[in-house]
Image (cartoon, grey):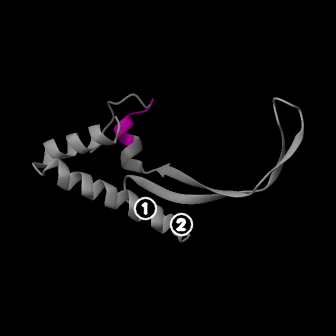
């Protein structure tokens, strides 16, 4: 499912226009990104938690030349699924489960 599929599915299930859902989805994504940028976690009970993981600087190797390179430290978004989301996927991640 891509963003347009998500917007269509939510619009169909709620009866709200696709344009309004698109604005809401964009606002949701922007709000999550802004919160993470400020160093805050975003906890959606039952769904999951978005957080920022700090990646340390490291030395790597250019696979083409074999030259040693310095890889800068960086921040990465991280997501940990909540109980309801895990349950919705079932014991093997293939659907089925209790969900809800």
In this rendering, position of residue 98 left or right of residue 69: left
Identify which residue, 100 or 66, lies in the foreground: 66
Q: CA distance from mark 2 to mark 1?
A: 9 Å
Q: Residue at x 19, y 52 (%)?
A: 19
The residue that label 2 is drawn on is 37
In this rendering, position of residue 56 left or right of residue 75: right
The residue that label 1 is drawn on is 32
Query: Residue 33 location, x and y as percent?
Result: 46, 61
Q: Residue furthest left?
A: 15
Q: Residue at x 13, y 49 (%)?
A: 14
Mark 1 neighbour density, 10 Å: few (under 14) some (14–19) many (20 or more): some
Q: Which residues are magenta?
A: 87-92
Secondary structure found at label 2: helix
Query: Residue 41 location, x and y as percent?
Result: 50, 65
Query: Residue 15 location, x and y as percent?
Result: 9, 48
Q: Is residue 13 above or below residue 43?
A: above
Image quadrant in which the C terminus is located: top left
Q: Is residue 2 above or below residue 39?
A: above
Identify which residue, 11 or 87, lies in the foreground: 11
Image quadrant in which the N terminus is located: top left
Please tell me which of labels 2 and 1 falls first in the chain: 1
């Amino acid at each position: 499912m891509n963003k347009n599929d998500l917007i269509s599915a939510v619009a169909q299930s709620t009866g709200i226009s696709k344009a309004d859902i698109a604005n809401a989805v964009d606002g949701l994504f922007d709000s999550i990104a802004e919160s993470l940028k400020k160093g805050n976690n975003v906890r959606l009970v039952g769904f999951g938690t978005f957080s920022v993981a700090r990646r340390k600087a490291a030395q790597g190797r250019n696979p083409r030349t074999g030259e040693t390179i310095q890889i800068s430290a960086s921040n990465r978004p991280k997501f940990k699924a909540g109980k309801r989301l895990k349950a919705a996927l079932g014991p093997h991640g293939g659907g089925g489960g209790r969900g809800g």
